[in-house]
Image: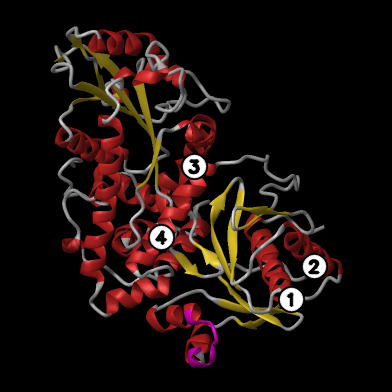
Amino acid sequence: MLKFNAKKYSTTLKLILLKAIKDIYPNGDIIIDNSLNNGVYGEIENVLLTEEGIEKISNRMKEIIDKNYPIELVVGNNEELKAKSETIEREDVRKLLDNSGWTSIMEYSIDGYHDYVYEKPYKFTGDIGVFELTKYNEGFIIKYPLTEDLVLPPKIDTPKLAKIFSESGKWNQILGVDTLGSLNEKVLNKEIGELIQVNEALHHKDIAKIAEQISHNKGIKLVTIAGPSSSGKTTFSMRLCIHLKANGLKPLLVSLDNYYIGRANVPLDENGQKDFETMDALDIKLLNENLKELIDGKEVEIPRYNFITGEREAVGDLKKLADENGIIVIEGIHGLNEKLTQVIPRENKFKIYISCLTQLNIDKHNRISTSDVRKIRRLVRDSLSREEKGEGTLAMWASVRRGEERHIFPFQEEADALFNSNLVYELGVLKNYALRELIRIKPSSPYYEEAKRLMRFLYCFVDIKIDLIPDDSILKEFIGGSLFYKY
């Protein structure tokens, strides 16, 4: 029996899916877009996809699996593919080859169908079997097992998240960039400066829209901001406060970090490690008392958490809402969970979910993982602001992801507004910062293969100069020089 490998499984399944779609809709232009609903969302341009069409594709996939076709490597040498790029029909692949110095692209075939991948598949179509294909909105969602028990992830529906992904796709149309090759082309043609300005303007436009939503509801006294690691919550919170002020409100920014119960008291997780991600690590009772008193117009002493001593301290930090236009803004991973601010009525709260949701693809059939982008953001910020080595960031990433799955993602659809903090150009900036850390990880490390994978990916991007990036950009939170995030 083959050893289960999630990347090989998903690559193999994707090749089978793409062949099945081309067999049934030869004129359809397939786009694999993003992760959604515990699966991957895609569309077939020029095709009005129906439930009947989905069934045809699914049945064809099962036929391809049953016939156990060999999955044959056609070209595994990047230079050979680059040399023949002019003969490649797909413009997205040509642009990638022509505008990237080095990529790990490989060409494979199944029964006459050819396509390009960046991870090796299994050797035969019959090496996989479990999948689920369903219709969703204008396209489809393909699900596959993530663990060796071959059980499909549970069914969920996240329409608000789907809407944000759709809007982000429209941003890419405005920017004229949808694949890595087209981004690199902008850099090489010296058009990246304007793209950066427009991308940043789109961020400002969305933040302004959220601030207006809040200001138009006079009953809102508390704004909570939550999102997974490296979403840019700190910069977003401060930029939102500026926009709230522009709407006549007087925000008071409160950090949830200051309500940690103290390092010695933090509960342990199932592995016996301190679980700073759980809500039980916060003094919920004191937080709610302080929030209620602030909303009632009282002056409150806000505690301060000392990350060096691991203790909460009283430092005489007295806060009070300015007047009837005062509003509290707090950011932290539990901001969407109603238990966090249970004494404040729901009608007096406005919840915001922020995440880095990339819509930039490597090419039309190969997406960029949103988790990878956040991982690279975190790796860069940890190395610059906390002197944490890249290996350390990779070592704790699984724990971070578990915390997100437990404490953030289950509540994202409860948000009143969602904000996508991704910048289409950011990996061209983060690239060299990340490579400095990844290249130091030795072959003896358990994270060496992951470091190699990320390096192969980052080498695809053409460098973008940091002096083109405005100081209020969310990206500056990770590379330094931010107006809002100092280190």
At x 24%, y 8%, the residue is 296
Label 3 crowd bin: few (<14), some (14–19), many (20+), radius 10 Å: some
Identify residue type, mark 2.
Arg
Say left or right for 112 vs 97.
right
Q: For residue 449: magenta?
A: no
Q: CA distance from mark 4 to mark 2?
A: 32 Å
Pointer 4: residues within 10 angstroms few (<14), some, or many (20+)?
A: some
Q: Position of residue 208 (x, y in %)?
A: 25, 43
Label drawn at residue 160: 3
Q: Amino acid at mark 3?
A: Lys
Camera-side residue of 173 and 73: 173
Q: Is residue 372 visible?
A: no
| Model colouring | secondary structure
The answer for how far apart the CA atoms under marks 1 and 4 are is: 29 Å
Left or right, 132 with respect to 86, comes to right
Instruction: Please identify the quarter of the rendering in which residue 11 is found.
Output: bottom right
Q: Which residue is mark 1?
A: 23
Badge 1: few (under 14), some or many (20 or more) residues near its Cα, within 10 Å? some
- In this view, the residue in front, 436 or 116, is 116
In three-dimensional space, the C-alpha distance between marks 3 and 4, rounded to whole angstroms, equals 16 Å
Marks 3 and 2 in Cβ contact (< 8 Å): no
**What are the residue bounds of the magenta stretch?**
85-91
Residue type (three-letter) at the residue carrying disc 4: Lys
The amino acid type found where label 1 is placed reads Asp
